[in-house]
Image (tube, rainbow, N blue to C red):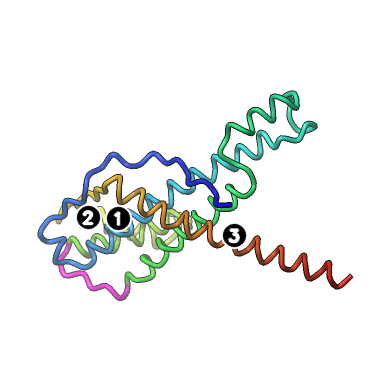
């Protein structure tokens, strides 16, 4: 049985409107893809957190909730959720974050061909540190300061704009991969259980 796709509020943005320089600078294209991947990752994180809070707040176990058993069953029936949906959402978020990390890993191979392209690469580096590290540790304040100076000289990056269709398509891609992974893991677990039973 396939898990339901998450209901996600898509961005109210339009298709990318890149400047002519962006079309020529691979670093600007890279940062645009990275920003989109981060946005999709954030959406899937919210879906995963919502499902996690539903499971935590309302596990449907009478002793753990203040509600009556009937009310708990009614509430559970009306929520997208359960351990399987949560597992799918968690894996979809992992797939999305993996895409973000792959884009970050490709920074050294992409050559910027303009000053704004260099700014794009630095934005990705500083943005990655915001996600995983302490931005007050050396050299991050120094890089951030240099990035501010470059922005003052050359201007800010073009703002990435994405259609709802692209957002939904990217979310669906990760969700479908997660559904397949969870189904394969469940099948593997069931096969191991069958093997254990036959041994006895």
Tag 2 residue: 149
Q: Residues within 10 Å of mark 2 (few under 14, many from 20)?
A: few
Q: Nearer the viewer, mark 3 or mark 1?
A: 3
Tag 1 residue: 145
The location of residue 55, given as percent across then percent down, is 64, 40
Please give left or right for residue 142 compared with residue 72 in the image.
Answer: left
Is residue 181 covered in magenta? no
The location of residue 16, given as percent across then percent down, is 20, 51
The local secondary structure at tag 2 comes to helix
Please give left or right for residue 104 compared with residue 146 in the image.
Answer: right
Mark number for residue 6? Answer: none
Furthest residue toward bottom: 109
The location of residue 5, given as percent across then percent down, is 48, 46
The location of residue 66, given as percent across then percent down, is 74, 25
Give the image quarter of residue 108: bottom left
Quadrant holding the C terminus: bottom right
Q: Residue at x 15, y 63 (%)?
A: 23
Asked if the residue under mark 2 is in contact with the one under mark 1, i.e. CB atoms within 8 Å, the reply is: yes
Whole-number angstrom distance, CA of label 3 to CA of label 1 = 47 Å
Q: Residues within 10 Å of mark 3 (few under 14, many from 20)?
A: some
Which span of residues is magenta-colored?
Answer: 108-115
Please give left or right for residue 24 compared with residue 72 in the image.
Answer: left
Q: Residue at x 63, y 43 (%)?
A: 82
Tag 3 residue: 183
Residue 34 drawn above or below residue 65:
below
User: Is tag 3's residue or tag 2's residue first in the polypeptide sequence?
Assistant: 2
Q: Nearer the viewer, residue 72 or 99?
A: 72
């Amino acid at each position: 049985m396939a898990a339901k796709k998450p209901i996600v509020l898509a961005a109210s943005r339009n298709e990318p409107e890149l400047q002519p320089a962006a079309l020529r600078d691979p670093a600007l294209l890279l940062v645009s893809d990275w920003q989109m991947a981060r946005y999709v990752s954030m959406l899937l994180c919210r879906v995963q957190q919502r499902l996690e809070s539903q499971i935590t707040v309302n596990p449907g176990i009478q002793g753990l909730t203040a509600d009556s058993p009937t009310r708990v069953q009614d509430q559970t029936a009306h929520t997208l959720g359960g351990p399987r949906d949560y597992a799918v959402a968690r894996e979809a978020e992992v797939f999305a974050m993996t895409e973000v990390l792959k884009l970050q890993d490709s920074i050294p191979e992409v050559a910027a061909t303009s000053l704004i392209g260099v700014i794009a690469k630095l934005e990705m580096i500083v943005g990655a540190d915001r996600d995983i590290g302490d931005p007050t540790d050396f050299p991050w304040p120094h890089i951030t300061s240099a990035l501010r100076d470059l922005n003052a000289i050359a201007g800010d990056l073009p703002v990435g704009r994405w259609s709802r269709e692209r957002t939904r398509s990217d979310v669906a891609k990760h969700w479908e991969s997660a559904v397949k992974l969870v189904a394969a893991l469940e099948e593997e677990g069931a096969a191991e259980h069958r093997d254990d039973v036959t041994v006895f």
